[in-house]
Image: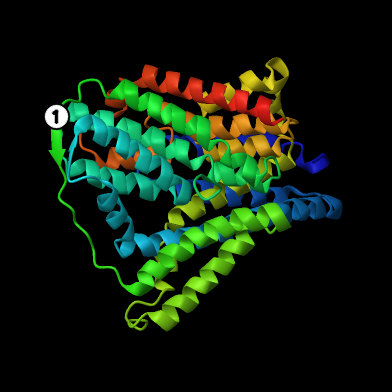
Amino acid sequence: MESSLLSLPPVLIGLAVLALLGVIFEEVTHINKAKITLFFGTLSWLLMFVASGNEEETLAISRGLSESIAEIAGLWLFLVAAMTFVAYLNKKGMIENVVYLIMPGKVTERKLLFLTGLFCFVFSSLADNITATLVSCSLILTLNLELKKRIQFVTLVVFAVNSGGVALITGDVTTLMIFLAGKVEILTLLTLALPSAITVFVLAVFLCRGLSGTVVLEPRLNSVRPVDAVISVLFLATIIATITFNSLFSVPPVLMFLFGLSVMFLVSRFMSDDSDLDPILEYVRSIEFETLLFFLGILLLVGSLKEIQALDSLVNIYQVMPPLAANYVMGVFSAIIDNVPLTAALLKSGIDMTAAEWMGLTYAVGVGGSLLVIGSAAGIVAMSKIPGLTFASYLRYVVHLFVAYTLGYAGVYLLGQFLY
């Protein structure tokens, strides 16, 4: 931008900083981060239109806004479809059933820690990490563990949830964003599951010290209707079809998930006997629209910064360090700065990296938030649900987390060298 827009960059950068502070200090201000980011994101574009001095500038701003809206629409529609499936299955008790079916009735605390990590890793790949964290926290609360052991369990939950999400576009928004930007292929992402799973196991080995007791789990199975079982299978089939059709025919994931959602509507209509009392469309309304509005606000905000070339400074770290080191540092930053705006900014800043290096960034921003309890949605949710989990109590295991994160990042680097 030039001429009349020359004075605007400092203002827009200031708004972005305020939005970021609003996200970081959400627990202090008690203002939802979705409201903060949406306000500053839309305000930034409004100011650009008002400050435009001629028709050419206005057209350029309009084109930039249209590009941002198109990117946001694709992300939104995919998340709406995926979150509707998860909201339905969670409400019907299908997810809770799976937990109690795979968990033995009587088990040692050490073995249960490993099983919990495995469940979180697998489930967060298929569903959103918030749901995976909530289900895991509910399980932990039923165990009546002493505080230290409870913190050990939830530390693994946060790391495992974030690690599981990086390998599938259904598991982590940053992974989805990097994929939609065309930086990595969907089958390549699946290979991230190997180093991610190994580091979850390594962290579980670190955290199992002091766990020597035995716990008894009382199963709380919910009744399963045929329609619920069919929709569960349909959800898994949609994920598999998304990967397969994208790899073979380059079908966009959002199209396949919307198709799966449409089939879900039809299955519910013809198999359910309570369509009037419990219409499937109600589950669209029950998904976490605050999360979706947060993504909307962040992407609008980052899009406005791109228009004024304010993201160029992010590239500087990649000029000072090689991408291997810079991506690792970005992962550590994601423990302080929300990984969604960080990833959006990196994608829009025009960084030129190889596919292997983009794999490293995908892992780094997806798992790096686990280093601090406030660094990811999983950690924030866990803090709100687990009594005694504080910033300081989680920080007790920061060395273990750093070692696991570093080993995982090294594994992704070696994997990238092998694949490319």
Residue 2 falls in image quadrant: top right
Residue denoted by label 1: 213
The answer to which of 280 and 168 lies nearer the viewer is: 168
Q: Is residue 316 above or below residue 37?
A: above
What residue is drawn where x is 64% and y is 21%? 324
Q: Quadrant of the N terminus?
A: top right
What residue is drawn where x is 56% and y is 39%? 341
What residue is drawn where x is 73% and y is 39%? 308
Res 228 seen here: yes
Q: Quadrant of the C terminus?
A: top right
Q: Is residue 408 above or below residue 342?
A: above
The answer to which of 142 and 305 lies nearer the viewer is: 142
Using residue 38 as the reference point, say whether residue 387 is left or right of it: left
Image location (x, y in percent) of residue 199: 44, 27
What residue is drawn where x is 19% and y is 56%? 220
Res 69 seen here: no
What amino acid is labelled 1 in the image? Gly
